[in-house]
Amino acid sequence: MKQSKIVTIERHIIEGERAHPGASGEFSALLRDLTLAFKVIHREVSKAGLVDIIGLTGKENIHGEQVKKLDAFADETVCKAMDHTGHLCIMASEEHEEALNIPDAYPKGKYVLLYDPLDGSSNIDVNITIGTVFSIYRRVSPGGKGTLDDCLQPGYKQIAAGYAIYGSSTMLIYSTGDGVHGFTLDPSIGEFLLSHENLRVPKRGKIYSINEGNYRFWDEGVKKFIKFLQEDDKSTNRPYTSRYIGSMIGDIHRTLMYGGIFMYPADQRNPNGKLRLLYEANPMSFVMEQAGGRASNGRKRILDVTPTELHQRTPLFIGSDEDVALAEEFLHGKR
Ligand code: AHG
Ligand code: MN
Ligand code: MN
């Protein structure tokens, strides 16, 4: 059997840093620390059915949703892997109302970490794909403790973003603005190995992904777009196939690999959509654009939106360049 070269995530990060002369190594260390958190979360997720970790903590998070034990575990794991390292000045997590300060005892660094500790958590009990999403910025405040301004930066300022996906295998997908690379965890050696170098999303796909149960609450543009995708026209891949897991991480990962479009639009009940700009839409949009795709809120590019609040929600249309551009035309009433 011919074996291709074996590259761990650590090696890949170091090689990436070599391409930037003058880099201090701090950013690489930050990414490596994050991969440790993902391995720990993978370990717990993979035995979720074995230990008494499944179930509710009984607490509600700030969105009024029940917090699952694994959400709390993942949240704490990321925080505890990162707060003492000296790389970060502040963090914010989907599970906490306020930003997370670095404890006084630890040094403050020049980076900011925003994360969704466990996306798709309603799927934990049924063994369906979930994941951890992260977004990294350079701080804008002068020094010492980080501030809210460090967290409220537009997505185009991300210097890295990505996700760990705990599916049939555990993968880590990330970008530092130089393409998108995918690694698969070999649990027997505890290493993420390069499996998908320089991922590119197809220009056009044939799968759409949306919660169609919300149909009657959508705007006319969204309804018309979905109907259009269901029409028969071989020259434009139609009818598209429909796939919806209800786990953004899984739905967008599939979109990245196969092409097509994932949507969580605004609707009558959720005028700003459901997904969170800082913890979900921005990092996934950074990755999708880096893979040659597109991401929009229906009016503008997601990465150009300047956030005003930590937990701000946004409509999201993300995936293949041509599919998202077409969605925008329908939303603008041009079709
Ligand atoms: P989270 O588990 O982090 O709270 O996110 C859940 C999100 C996202 O993963 C998914 O795309 C969406 O909720 C599904 O929402 P619907 O059930 O309304 O379709
Ligand atoms: Mn989420
Ligand atoms: Mn979550």
Image: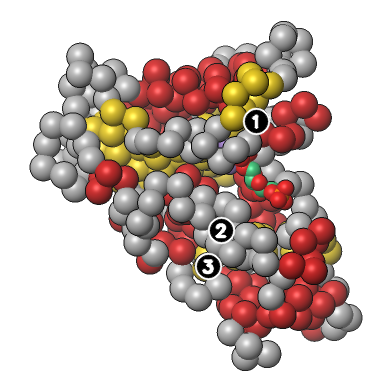
**Residue 321 versus residue 61: which sits nearer the camera?**
61
Q: Which mark is residue 66?
A: 1
Q: Are marks 1 and 2 in contact (CB under 8 Å)?
A: no
What residue is shown at x 86% (from left), y 80% (from top)? 231
Q: Are marks 2 and 3 in contact (CB under 8 Å)?
A: no
In the rendered image, which residue does mark 3 sit on? 297
Residue 143: image location, x then y, percent: 12, 36
Position of residue 79 relative to residue 18, above or below, is above
Residue 85: image location, x then y, percent: 28, 21
**Label 2 element class:** loop
Amino acid type assigned to the residue bearing label 3 in the image: Asn
**Label 3 element class:** loop
- Residue 251 falls left or right of residue 29: right
| Disc 2 versus disc 3: nearer the observer | 3
Q: Which mark is residue 200?
A: 2
What residue is shown at x 42% (from left), y 28% (from top)? 34
Write down which quadrant ligand 1 falls in. top right
- Residue 81 falls left or right of residue 198: left
Task: Judge whether residue 85 can be spotted in this image.
Answer: no
